[in-house]
Image (cartoon, grey):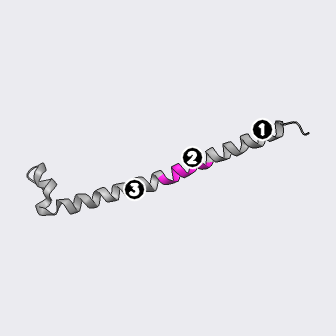
Amino acid sequence: MQFENFAALWEMQGHGPYVWGAYAIAVVVMIAVVWAPLARQRRFISEQRQAAQRRHQRQQQPIA
């Protein structure tokens, strides 16, 4: 499929908004698929560090 210029590529004979919209949705979904687990992992690691710090502080407190 060849287009004469960039405007023709963008318009795709009237189908451009649907095609480019579908591409945009696909890109957003792919970004979310990568980003969500990374964010969850960062949050989990942060929570584990905080829990370890609390355990460490409890161990350092003298028993009364």
Name the residue at the front extreme. 64
Residue at 78 percent of width and 38 percent of height? 57
Image quadrant containing the C terminus: top right
Segment tinted magenta in the rendering: 36-44
Given residues 26 and 48, the one toward you in this image is 48
Residue at 23 percent of width and 57 percent of height? 20
Image side of residue 51 versus residue 61, left or right: left
Q: Is the magenta stretch mostly helix, strand or loop?
A: helix
* Residue that label 1 marks: 57
Relative to 64, residue 16 above or below = below
Image side of residue 61 versus residue 47, left or right: right
Question: Closer to the observer: label 3 or label 1?
Answer: 1
Question: Closer to the observer: label 1 or label 2?
Answer: 1
Among numbered discs 1 and 2, the one appearing first in the sequence = 2
- Mark 3 lies on a secondary structure that is helix
Residue 47 x/y as whole percent = 64, 47
